[in-house]
Amino acid sequence: MATARRMDSPTLADVARRAGVTRLSAQRALHGQPGVGEQTREKIQRIAKRLGYRPHWAARAMRSGRLGCLALLMSVERYRGFLEHELLGGMVAEASEHDYHLTVGTLPEERATDAQYVPKALRELLADGLLINYHFGIPPRMAELIEQHHIPAVWINTKRAWDCVHIDDLQAGRLATEHLLKLGHRRIAYVDYAHALDELDQVHYSAIDRAAGYEEAMQQVGLPSRVIWLPSKSLDTKHLEFTREWLAEPDRPTGLVMYSALPAGAIALAATSFGLRVPQDISMVSVDWPRTKPFGLEMTVTMPQIAEMGRAAVRMLLEKIEAPGKRLRPRAIPAVLHEGGTCAPPT
């Protein structure tokens, strides 16, 4: 009876005995550690799989002082931290490759700034470190407490002086502009209908950086820049009327770099009222993901590598877990260009 129960839950010793190796060698092979030859490693892994061996995580945590878990923290306020499928997938995949799993939790602001709660956060979340998915509006006290108590934490999709991973939105805006310049466009404007001039002091860093990347590329070739924002958030539902106003100007742009594909439909519709076509008369490039077809044509986009941002955040957090008090330099993940059907040389 005892033997039957034992084989129902095979141990590391069972795997080692079947493989003809020491328990230490079996442990190294199953946890990706050095000191075991490749053929031996593969043999041990095959035997472990055949026996149905699973590591005893509680025992392992007691030995190592690690729980093998990373916690992804989200704000309870929806717009403070979007969670894209690709971002989550990148984090889960990278964590798994390092023998960690990921748990997800929400954190109300009152707890995030509570000097009594923050030092206990890792224990309550049963995690070795925090991936913080707050994009903007981060409570300053929250960041202070995390650093003060040397809690291993990495901030995702926000720009900070250290311990953060974000998309290189400056490069994304520059890359989109350079694409239009290579096609021969010289009258290129930047369009952002996701934000308004009266709210630029409280927007995500990408709103500023994508426009700055566009301006940088235009300055580099000695061309004037033109940034078109919604003048006020009150025009949020009047994209068509607002677009017609600047398309009616005699020096209208032939190429558009857009914060996102949001205004593409309104621009294409407004263009038809002036006898203009996309891309023959107006070319568009947006910074966006996933690739979209807002008016039947697939957008040309500079696409942020969202999955890689998730992977890089996990790698940085693992570094922080090894050295909680060490500040790590920010890591900016570049965007890549995907050509669609919305760009052509100017006529």
Image: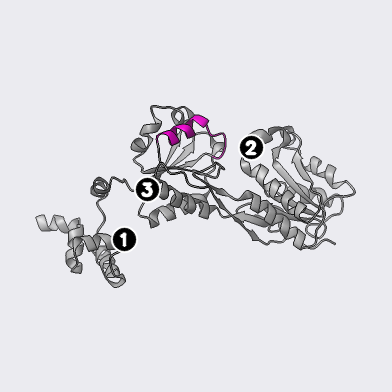
| Left-right relation of 64 to 127 | left
User: At numbered mark 2, what does the secondary structure look like: helix, strand or loop?
Assistant: loop
Q: Which color scheme does this rendered protein use?
A: one colour
Q: Residue at x 44, y 52 (%)?
A: 315
Q: Residues within 10 Å of mark 1 (few under 14, many from 20)?
A: few
Q: Which residue is mark 2?
A: 203
Q: Residue furthest right?
A: 250
User: At numbered mark 1, what does the secondary structure look like: helix, strand or loop?
Assistant: loop
Prevailing secondary structure of the magenta residues: helix
Question: Which stretch is magenta?
Answer: 135-149
Cα–Cα gap, marks 3 and 2: 34 Å
Q: Which residue is mark 1?
A: 33
Q: Residue furthest left?
A: 1
Mark nearest the camera among 2 and 1 is: 1
Residue 158, position as x, y percentages in the image: 56, 42
The residue type indicated by label 2 comes to: Val
Cα–Cα gap, marks 3 and 1: 16 Å
In the displayed structure, 284 sits above or below 41; it is: above
| Left-right relation of 42 to 170 | left
Q: Which residue is mark 3?
A: 322
Q: Residues within 10 Å of mark 2 (few under 14, many from 20)?
A: some
User: At numbered mark 3, what does the secondary structure look like: helix, strand or loop?
Assistant: helix
In the displayed structure, 146 sits above or below 179; it is: above
In the displayed structure, 49 sits above or below 236; it is: below
Residue 35, position as x, y percentages in the image: 28, 65
> Is residue 208 among the parts visible in the rendering?
yes
Quadrant in which residue 31 is drawn: bottom left
